[in-house]
Image (cartoon, helix red, strand yellow):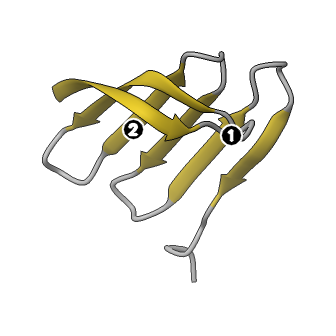
Amino acid sequence: MVGNTIDFTDERAPCGRFVNGLRYQEDDDAGLFVDRVAYACGCRRIRREFHDGSVHVKVVRHDGAVLQDEHSAEHEA
């Protein structure tokens, strides 16, 4: 897997604050893609795109509240 780390500034976190943070992305060039974002306030967002086309998204606010935890299953008939 190939990974990239990207610093960012003034992006809106899930809690609504504009903060700095760090984004880490991985790609295996065969369909798996992972995007992890850690915000300075403590919020987190992770998006995984799998080989079968399904997607999992999880968003956690800095106080630990899960705002989103969804897995698409569009590949299933």
Q: Which numbered circle lies on residue 35?
A: 2
Judge from the rendering whether residue 10 lies leftward or rightward of residue 26; answer left or right. Answer: right
Q: CA distance from mark 2 to mark 1?
A: 15 Å
Q: Position of residue 12 (x, y in %)?
A: 57, 42
Can residue 1 be seen?
A: no
Tell me what residue is drawn at x 60 percent, y 67 percent.
Answer: 73
Tell me the residue that label 1 is attached to.
Answer: 14
For marks 2 and 1, the one nearer the N-term is 1
- Camera-side residue: 13 or 29? 13
- Residue 33 appears in which quarter of the rendering? top left
Q: Amino acid at mark 1?
A: Pro
Tell me what residue is drawn at x 65 percent, y 16 percent.
Answer: 42
Q: Position of residue 15 (x, y in %)?
A: 75, 36
Can residue 36 be seen?
A: yes
Q: Amino acid at mark 2?
A: Asp
Q: Nearer the viewer, mark 2 or mark 1?
A: 1
Given contact means CB atoms under 8 Å apart, are the residues at marks 2 and 1 in contact?
no
- Residue 17 appears in which quarter of the rendering? top right
- Camera-side residue: 62 or 53? 62
Tell me what residue is drawn at x 70 percent, y 53 percent.
Answer: 70
Q: Position of residue 71 (x, y in %)?
A: 64, 55
